[in-house]
Amino acid sequence: MSSKVRILLVTLMACGLAISAISIGAAQEKSLLRVGFSWPTFIDPAVGSDYSSAATMVNLYDTLVYPAHGGGVIPHVAKSWVTEPLAVTFELKEGVKFHDGSELTAEDVKFSMDRLLEIGEGTAYLFMGKIESTEVLDKYKVRFNLATPFGPFIPALARLHILNKDVVMANLKKEGPYGDYGDYGKEYLLTHDAGSGAYMVKEFAFEESILMERFPDYFGHVAGNAPDEVLFMQSPDTVTVKTMMSRRELEMTDPWQPEEAYVAMDAMEGVEIARMLAGELEYLMFHTRRPPTDDVHFRRALSYLLNYDEVTATIFPGTLQSVGPIPHGLPGFKEGLFQYNYDPDKAREELQRSKYSNQLDEVSVTLVMKAGDAAGEKLSLMYQAACAEVGINMELVNVTWGQMVALAGNIDSDYNIIGVGVAPDYAEAGSFLQSKYHSNTVGTWMQPEWVQEPLIDFLIEDAVGTMDKDERFKKYGLLQELVVNLAYSIFLVDPVMQYAYQAAYVIWPQQANPLFVMGFNHDCRFIEVLPEKKP
Amino acid sequence: MALPAYVVRRLVYSLFILLGLTMFVFVISRVMPNDPARVALGPQAPEKVVQRYREWMHLNEPIPAQYYYWLKNVLSGNLGESIYTRRNVLLDIQDFLPATMELALFSALIMTLFGILLGALSARYANTWVDNLVRMGSYAGVVTPAFIFGIFFLLLFGYVLRILPTMGRLSAGVTDPPVITGMITTDSLITGNFAAFFDALKHLLMPATAMALGGVAQEARITRSSMSDNMLKDYIAVARAQGIPERAITLKYLLKPSLIPTVSILGLDFAALIRNAFLVEIVFGWPGLSRYAIKAMTLTDLNAITGVVLVLGVVFTTVNIIVDVVVAYLDPRIRLGGAGNE
């Protein structure tokens, strides 16, 4: 290579590096909060319902009410509301602006609810069959007419994100399953928002990240040092996450890192681990229509065979053993319920009472876990060994998520226990009771127990239909006792969500006082980023 | 057979191969016990909504009818909706394939250049410390999975030395070039955005090298072996007897014919690169097609699985045709189409 060519190449590279350094430097003048998440993220309020989608929508959209600590809600877009036995009327704040500058009105609230119910995905199940109609009374008044009494209706509205009707209607795609509405704006809302939230979409890279920027005309409170831009990005491999945290290229991790990664990140300068009860619960769910788990004594025996102390100490460290079917602290959780503990002698006693006591060598229990779940595999092996000690043969099966859904959907499927975690739809015990034990949820992965008891159905419907909160919570308590006694599931642990974050220059108020409604702990307008404190 | 005729014939064969491939994958993915509509819409979606989705996706129809609808749509450029991203699979592939292709092509470049160079050096200095070093390195390269190299590079250059970016295709704050090919390095060069070009290059360096090292080792071993064989042939002895300088013999008379086996397996190595891309894409947060395909499989995303297989089938077929043509160029005795290698 001649010296001229060499000089030219070196000069070109130097220029490129200089330009790249300048452009990066310029961009970093804005404060940026980078958060790791899972993917996909759906920002269409009628589609998204998982964790990353919920957290993103909280930033892009507003809701009528906002979750309050300790249960209940406070006004948000709604100024006030009036409750009747079968209707709730909301009066909206005036001057709430969408990202395009237009005003949020009652018409938009009605449109959002109608669209959600028509599409039927996302969080629509919270309201389907419960709302008769939505009426616009005037520009700032909207009335929901309920089909049946639904006590947690107002808390559930914290998950109704309000869309800008005009923007959605202007972006309908003609082809689609919704008649005159075509695709109802679903394609547009995959990558764009139509909201009024404190942040708006700036860039959306599928499978990679969503970059949001501050909405200057936001009506609500925004902390003084709230980030100018927020990047929710797909979390890479654990090694990469740790490296990024050490280089301060990531402000918050996702909560799904292995325990050893949190230990390593905790040791990094300026990094702290936020631990929050997730309001979720890890279950082992018994197939109650299939031998031998169709026998309550056999199910109780199996409940006594799990070493819960070992599980919370080594397999899910930092978690709490669950007490009954509702996570600790979720409004409606009943204190003082009976709690199963590891006790092989009691397991033997229960087995003697079961109808399978004389044929233990003939029956076998199949435990199905999700493939690739390291903690689940450890748990399975430990459980299998404990069962073998009392003469129960346990077969372990690992399946993909799709296969697990299909297994749960068929009553004749060959499984006895399925291990899955469940999150609440709204911040009340009724959410769990309804999705876990009402007969209309059998066949979903949330109810592979196949519980189809008219009495249980009646008690659940009666509880969630009770408008008085204290009365409703009392009924939830009764149901919890019943479910524990019938041992439909093993109530394994209340997971604690762990997030590593850059405490040296990020103030995250929600981590000290978390909310139980999905996504609200990532409402970035309350989070502060102080680049000048960056070590 | 003339080159154009050969290429046309291979293309026609490829169509049948691709058709068979999609049929096979289509049937396999649909006979597995799964409920993609329920997976897509979630556990709480009412049954009538799930049913509407099944009808919309033709999931209630017999498999031959489903394949008919799928093929009909493919012919009009529609690969169906992905239940994972909820948009047309074609759009997903347009987004993710360039990222993987950029990674694979850059790896292939490293693999070819360094594989041949090291192989040639090893053969030229056979049984010296150079040869021993290359051979030992080759053994290590062949047996070590790409993601191990990826994690090692990440720790060394990302965590300890901190000189290379750790994830993604471009740093935050660097403006993306307009999408022309979807490959950032190419698009940034075309549009003269050198900041993006150098930044993208920095992002490519670790994952592409991690993916390439196994191939480098293999190419080096094959090149060395082929060159060593050819060195013993009469025409090389004649060249030496005529006093042709050793360097000219190596480069002009030895290397070119020795590259035939190396180039022949390049097609397979390219396939291996894409196969190995998955874990490397995970390690480096690279939004590529391999990662997308694995997600599609775990979620039983039927249209995405079939679409990805179809596209990868097209890529591999094309690469193999190119390899055949290059081999024919390297050895004029080879007649394309197998009419006779006399």
Image: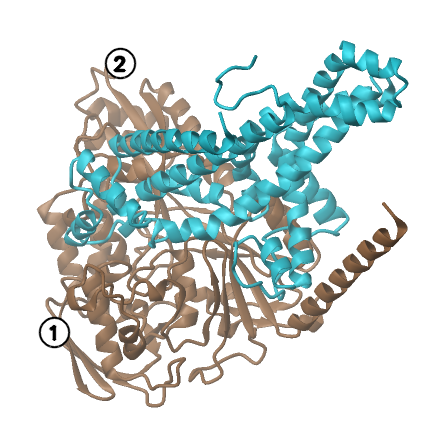
Chain colours: A brown, B cyan
- Considering every residue shown, the one lying at the far front of the view is B2
Q: Earlier in the sequence, mark 2 or mark 1?
A: 1
Viewer-side label of 2, 1: 1
Task: Return the x and y of residue A280 as percentages of the image width and height.
Answer: 37, 52
Q: Position of residue A85 (x, y in %)?
A: 12, 75
Chain letter for mark 1: A
Q: Residue at position x 77%, y 9% from top?
A: B234
Estimate the x, y position of residue B174 in percent, counting from the top left: 63, 64
Which residue in the protein does label 2 denote? A361
| Cα–Cα span, label 2 and label 1 | 56 Å
At 59% from the left and 46% from the top, the residue drawn is B284
Type of the residue with mark 2: Asp
User: Considering the numbered disc 1 on the image, is that residue within a helix, a strand or a loop?
Assistant: loop
Residue A435 can be seen in this image: yes
Q: Chain of mark 2?
A: A
Q: Dot 1 corresponds to which residue? A: A86
In terms of depth relative to the viewer, which is nearer, A504 or B185? B185
Q: Is residue B77 left or right of residue B248?
A: left
Q: Are marks 2 and 1 in contact (CB under 8 Å)?
A: no
Q: Is residue A506 left or right of residue A13?
A: left
